[in-house]
Amino acid sequence: MSAPGPEAGAGAAAPPAAVAAAGGWRRESGERSLPEAHGTVPVPRHFGFWRKLLAFSGPGYLVAVGYMDPGNWATDLAGGSRFGYTLLSVILLSNLMAILLQSLCARLGIATGRDLAQACRDHYSRPVNVVLWMLCEAAICACDLAEVIGSAIALKLLFGLPLVAGVLLTSLDVLVVMFLTHRSFRWLEVLVVTLIVVIGGCFLAQILFARPDAGAVFRGFLPRAEIVTNPEMLYIAIGILGATVMPHNLYLHSSIVQTRKYEGTPEGKREAIVFATIDSSVALMAALFINAAILIVAAAAFHRSGTVVDGIEKAHELLAPLLGAGMASVLFAVALLASGQNSTLTGTLAGQIVMEGFLNLRIRPWLRRLATRALAIIPAAIVAGVAGDRGAEKMLVLSQVILSLQLPFAVVPLVLFTGDRAKMGEFVAPLWIRILAWVTAATIIVLNAKLLLDVLSSRGH
């Protein structure tokens, strides 16, 4: 059996049993999300604002790495090389949606002591939960497929490793997760933030090499109707949306905010929600910079020259001659490797949280992580071996569309729960946030429906 988490004392986050008084939950359960790390990061009472913010900082960056993974690279490169700076508005809109939804995740986890998967298990019938779990596992597999293939491509670009060998090598990340979470959850956060800094530095240098048109970049952040009316542009736009607002990140964030040992009082929870929201918002702004930077570099280097880029490897090959800087290609590959490894670390944790939350499956942490990792490695190895390099890269964009199609099944329960006063008590989301959240959910559903209609009509012709 898995090791129990720390005892909930006066300074720890209250377990679900302590918040069931809100009356909206069917069961009073003392189980903790991610029990081996629950409440292990102390938040001293008498710290000032900045010291407390530092203590709460970390979970947002683990979430943010999912917004800059290789799947994002594939969609951003495709969008920038085909349509210039036009889809920057989609990246901005997606990031604003992400900030809103992740703040709701933090609110749910801190106020109720349940992660989103546990909340679903409590609220819905078992058949519904099984369906939701299967959909979420499919999304995690699609996401991990993109991350593993992206890392393997980076290893091939840097060291000449065959794609299948690179896929198998990325499986070692599970050992890193097990080692760091055993030592301290804080060490895992430090590693993730370090890799984010590496990615950001690499793309800052590439923007300087690319010298984009500042006016065109600014205009790219203004929405255009053609994004919806052009089926090809919409396909990439929804891929960007799926790569940015990721379903498994909603489950992940609602869990890892509970690694902080905040006060279990209403005042302590209210303060924790504020700091967790700041943490995730700042981290996601960093993700916005990196996503925008990928698209800007692609637009400046490829779209401006009329070069067609249909994959990450071709982008790597063409960067140096187009930008006139030999280091551009190396920085591109280093950033790709960092983003892939960063995302697989958090994807492994998300798989564990989803499996435990929906199924209440309590097995040893190392075994859970090996099982969730195998769900990603096996399909990725098959795709890499059978489809080859070009097939693997096409799967990157497709995987992001799959994520977007699954997103409503995670977003709708999140918005429902956090807007339910019976479940949330005094921590129910304010009316204006609920309205924005429902608008966000409706936007995602409508765009997905439009994409499906376009795909079906194109096949009919």
Image (cartoon, helix red, strand yellow):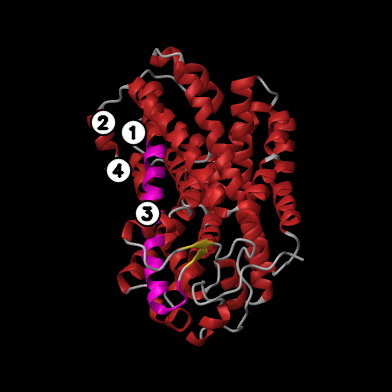
Is 268 above or below relative to 453?
below
Q: Quadrant of residue 381?
A: top right
In 3D space, how far apart are the residues under numbered discs 4 and 1 (Cα atoms)?
11 Å
Q: Which residue is mark 4?
A: 224
N-term-proximal mark, 4 vs 3:
4
Q: Which residue is mark 3?
A: 281
Is residue 447 shown to the viewer in this render? yes
The reply to whether discs 4 and 1 touch (Cβ–Cβ < 8 Å) is no
The answer to whether residue 371 is left or right of residue 6 is right
Q: Which residue is mark 1?
A: 85
In 3D space, how far apart are the residues under numbered discs 3 and 1 (Cα atoms)?
24 Å
> Mark 4 against mark 1, which lies toward the viewer?
1
The answer to whether residue 50 is left or right of residue 376 is left
Q: Which residues are magenta?
A: 263-292
Amino acid residing under circle 2: Ala
Under circle 2, the secondary element is helix
Q: Looking at the image, which residue is at 61% across and 44% down?
A: 344
